[in-house]
Image (cartoon, rainbow, N blue to C red):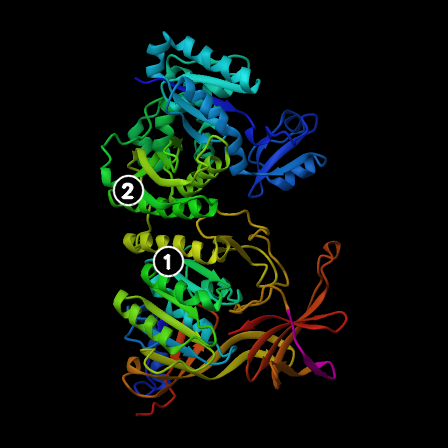
Amino acid sequence: MLTTSFGDVLDRRALDDIIGDTALRVLKPANILCVEPGRVVGLVGETGTGLTRLGMHMLTEVSQQAPVAIVDLNGWISPLAAWEVGIAPERLVMIREVARDQWADVMGVLLRGVPAVYAEVPPGISGQVLRRITSSARKLKTSVVLRSITELPSGVAHLMISSQGVVWTGAEAGYGYLSARDLLVGVNGRGAGGRNQTLEVEDDGTDTLRMVGRVGASSR
Amino acid sequence: MGRILCVWWDAWALRRADIPSAEASFAVAKGKVIAVNELAREGGLFRGMQRRAAESLVPNAHVIEHDPVGDTRRFEPVVQLIEDVVPRVQIVEPGLVFVPITGAIDYYGGEQQVVDLLVGNIEQAFGGGARFGVADQPFAARCAAALAIERPIIVSDDAKFLASRDLSVLPNPDIVDTFRWLGIDTLGALAALPRAAVASRFGNTGLDAHLLASGDPQAVSPRIIPEDLVAGKVFEEPLLLVQQVEFVARELASELMTGLRAVGVAPRVIVIQVESAAGSLRERTWRSTDPLTQVAIGERVGWQMRTWLESKEGVGSGIVSLKLLPLEVSGEGRQLGFLEDTAAVQQAEQAFTRLQSVVGPDNVVTARRQGGRTPAEQVRWQPWGEEDAELERATIAPWPGRTPGPAPSLVPPSPVPLAVEWDGGMPSRVRLRSRWVEVLNWAGPWRRVGRWWKEEEAVDEYQIVTSAGAILCHVRRDGATFMAALYD
C-alpha cells in the first residue's frame, strides 16, 4: 500500500493519525508516488538512494491485475525487494542484461504488451529515443518508470522524482541491523501539479511506504 | 466408438547407442528422474524421484540429461513406419504414440490383424521393447500398454478393465493422494462415486480423474473449430535455419493460443503442417493428456521442425509454409486469478515471447523464493514460460544467519571487489567509483562459515551506511572486501 500526502497539506501528526487507523490504511488517497496509464515517471539519482525500491513500489497496484516487467541492464536487480514491496512473484518478469543497442527494441515490445514497466536507462541513450518512448507510452496507455543515474531530457517524464538524500536507522556502531530508511526526494513536473516539492518517504522494509508531511513544498 | 492403439517404449530417452546396456542408467530433466533402465530399477530407482536421491542410491549409474530434440529425431523413423500402415499417428512424447485404428480395422480385416502387422513391422525394424495396448480411449490403451510386457493387450470394455487398476495410473499425483486419504485405492472405487459429487468437491481436477477412471471420453469439446483459428505463415524465402523456424514456431504458437483463448478453449491435439521448397508436404500430429499451453506447443513444433530439417528425408530444401491446426480442443481454459485482466495477461505473454527472440530466452526470466542465507541464494531464476525448476534450497528450513531485511534491491551476480578503509577494526571510508565516502554507521560483523567442503570461503558480513547509501559488505579471511549487495 502506498499512502501519500503533500507536505503542505498535512502535518506529521495529522498524517500519523490517518495512517495509524487500520481502516483507513487500506484506502488509497490521491497520491503522487504512483503510476498512471500512459504516463512516464522519471527516477533520477545516484545508486544507493532508494529509488529502485521506490520504483518497484510504483508497479505494485498494476501487478494485481496483470504481469509487470523490469528491464535490468546489468542483471543486478533483485526480485526479493520487488516481492517485499508487494509485487507477486508470478506477476513479475525481468528482462536482464539488456545491451544498450537492444534497449529501445525491448522497450518497444514491452510498451505494446505490458501495462507497467520499470526500466533502467542505459547511459548515453538519446533524448529522441526517450521521447519516442514517452509518445508510445501515451498512445498505448502503458505506465513507465525510467530509472536513470543522470538527468533525463525535459519533456520525457510526466513526473520527475530526484533523490536528495537517504537516512538509515537501525545500525549503530556495529550493533543492530539496517531496519528502515527515510528518503528525501524532490518532485516536479506536470504530475506534481507544476510545483517543485520536497517529500520525505518512510520505508520500513514492508510493502508500505509512507509519506511524511513535515517537509514544506515550494511553489514554482 | 473408435479404437485406439497405444505404442509405448519404457525409457525411450535411454534407447541410445552411446548408453551401455550392461550398466545402470537413468535420464534426468530439471533435477528429476524421467527414465530408468532395468538395472537402475533393480537398484531402487523410479521415475519422478529426485536426481540427488537417485545418484546416492546407485552412485555408479550412467546419467544422461534429457534431450527432447534428440529423442524426437530418433523417434521419427518409428512414426514414419507406423504411418506406412495407419495414418494420423498422434505423438504424445518421443516413445509414446496413439494410433486411431478404426479405419484400419476394416481395411486389414480385423483388430488383431492390424496389431499383428504393426507389432511385426516395429519388432523387425527396431527390435523388442515396445508395448502395445488397444482400447476405446487413450487412457485405457495407455494402461493396457503398460501391462503388455510380453504380448499386446486388447481391451474390449474400458470401464471393466480400468476398475481394478490402482489409482497411481492417474496423471495427477496430488489428487491421487487425496483420494487415497479418503480410502479410495482403485479406479473402480473412484468411478463408483457420483460424478456430480466429485466435481462439486474436487473441481475440474476431480472431474477429469473421474472421467478417466470411468473409461468415459475425455473432456474433449466436439465443437467445430473456426477456420481462422488455424495459425499459419508463408515465407517468400525458404527457412533453412533451425533458429529461424523455432522463432516462427513460438510466434505461431502465440497466435494460435490467442485465437483459441478468445473462444475459451485450449487444444489437446495439434497438427503441424509444413511445405518444403521442393514441394513436398509433411504433417505430424501431437497429442497431450492436458490441454496444451503456448510454451508446450512452441516446444513441440520446435522439436518436430528440427527433426525434419536435420533428417535426410525431411524438408532439407527449406520450409516455405508452416501451419498449426488445433484438432481436438478442450473447454478447460486456464484458471485466471480473481483480479486478473485476461486480455492484459495474453498481451503480456505475447510480448515476453517476442522478447525471448530479441534478448534470448535465458534473459527473459521469472524468479521464485527459495531458502538461503545471502540475498543471492534466496532467488531461484528460471526462463519465463518454463515449468517451475526444482528449488536448490528448501524454504522451510530456518536458515540461521540469514541477512536481515529489508532486502537489498541490487545484488550483483557475484560479489564485486570493494575498497574499504579500516580504523581500529571499524570501517571508516569506502571507495565508490573514484571517490572515498565516509562511513556513517555500520552493523555487524556476522561471521558466515562457508561450506568448506565445497571450497566456499568464510566471510564476515557488514552492513555499511555511507552518505551515498548502504552496502552489504563481505570481508574474507585474507582481508579482501567485496560488495555483496546494494540497498537502492
Q: Is residue B165 visible?
A: no
What chain letter is assigned to the residue under label 1?
A
Q: Position of residue A65 (x, y in %)?
A: 32, 58
User: Which amino acid lies under the numbered mark 1 shown in the image of this protein?
Assistant: Pro
Prevalent SS, magenta region: strand
Q: Residue at x 30, y 17 (%)?
A: B1
Nearer to me, B26 or B158: B26
Q: Is residue A31 visible?
A: yes
Residue B349 is labelled as: none
Q: Residue at x 30, y 88 (%)?
A: A195
User: Which amino acid lies under the numbered mark 2 shown in the image of this protein?
Assistant: Leu
The kind of secondary structure element at disc 1 is loop
Q: Which residue is mark 2?
A: B260
> Total marks drawn?
2
Q: Which residue is mark 1?
A: A67
Q: Quadrant of residue B483?
A: bottom right
- Please say whether residue B253 is one of the residues in the magenta stretch: no
Q: Are marks 1 and 2 in contact (CB under 8 Å)?
A: no
Q: Residue at x 36, y 56 (%)?
A: B351
